[in-house]
Image: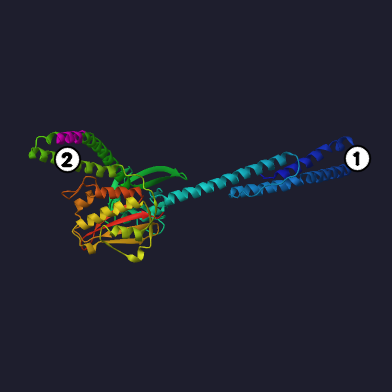
Amino acid sequence: MIHLSLRVRVYITVGLCACIGTLPLYFFSELTLLQSALLTASLAAVSLFVASFLLKDYKAGIEALETGLLNIKDGEYSTTLAHQGNDEFADLCELYNETVEKLRIEKHWLFQRELLLDKVTQSSPSVLLLINDQQQIVFSNLAARDFFTIQRSLEGHTLEELIDMAPKGFQSIAYQSRDGLFSIKTTDGEQQTWHLSNGQFRLNNQPHRLIILKQLTRELSRQEVAVWKKVIRIISHELNNSLGPISSMLHSGKILSKSQEDDRLQRVFSTIEERIHHLSDFVQGYGKFAKLPEPKLQHVQLKPFFDKLREQWLFHTNESEIGKQLFADPIQLEQLLINLLKNAHESGSPSDAIELIIIEEHKHTVIELYDRGCGMSDTVMNSALIPFYSTKSTGSGIGLALCREIIDAHHGQMTLKNRVDGGLSVRLLFPIG
């Protein structure tokens, strides 16, 4: 079938109409055949000329519209059409311009959403991996590079290659299509709990698998602390309800016993009073942990702060770094460091071996406390931050738990680690305000 453009079809139609209009000349006119043919040719030529003149604007418009549609096909929406007149083609041009403007707005909106989505996914602490049906990575974020300790892009690698480079805990669950928990041990010896979730969907009509890895260590710790706080509040409430009446009765008993002049009765009341004070101090100590207020953050100059702290506990610092400042609650920070320094001195470490080191990192300020005490066994290390747990005969088991609560309230991180040559190191990580 011959392909003819609309303009050619119009010319053919006009020419045929002109020729058909002259047919009576051949049958009913006295003109010769040659004269009739010349008249037909002249009329057809004039008709085609008039049609060409009338369609010249449409020819340019159709060509412009064709160019504009090709630009839309290529994703370019900057071309608009200008047409003077009040006909159907002017309406078509106006509709085209409105469509292009709407597409331009939607393209800009989609571009902004794409930038936002990329920013969110790249800055997300969760590990994101998008895998095609060939088991190749087609998308990953920065957290994925950190998890697999690869500083270059992961796109193009296969899942099997990544599993070989992943921590051991991940290897056992990576091939499974179900969600689940797994644990890994970091290079610092810290045990971390992660959750793996899978998603199956089609992208570009091809099946893809989305793997999301989320670290739950802090969340589990937060839930654990929340449970302990609830227990402590219940215990404190019950003890306070009992201590009040007991104290009142003790006071009345001591008044009545004065007339008896019995030393044994006095010793009984003194012992009861001593235990009441002990229980009261016990309740107040745990109350600090259960009702820790929100930190009032401000810039703390470390040199005068450490000078004041050194009046209570002996330790050494890297003096060249003390000009730094920390964005923290000074009262809670003091309580945190007092607890840690107290533990360091009670660990059997020489006083001159206890150090507080300040390290400035890219997004964090780090305080590291070192001692040369006996360190911690693995069992003690795993339970050291749990409330009520203590290896000391007179300990309450709240000191390190309170330290962790304070550092969590500052959105920081606390890590305990045994030193190679003996002793313990405590690493406190504070975000830069």
Q: Residues within 10 Å of mark 1 (few under 14, many from 20)?
A: few
**Colour mode of the rendering:** rainbow
The number of numbered badges drawn on the structure is: 2
- Outermost residue toward the bottom in this view: 320
Q: Earlier in the sequence, mark 1 or mark 2?
A: 1
Quarter of the picture holding the N terminus = top right
The residue at which mark 2 appears reads as 273
- Observer able to see residue 172: no
Tell me if 289 is positioned left or right of 156 in this view. Answer: left
List x then y, in percent, for residue 293.
Answer: 34, 44
Quadrant hosting residue 27? top right
Does 57 sit left or right of 395 as displayed?
A: right
Disc number lying in front (1 or 2): 2
What residue appears at the point 32 percent right and 47 percent down from the top-left corner? 218
Is the C terminus in the top left, top right, bottom left or bottom right quadrant?
A: bottom left
Which amino acid does the dot numbered 1 rest on?
A: Leu
Q: State the extent of the magenta-drawn residues as a range.
A: 245-255
What number is the disc on residue 386? none
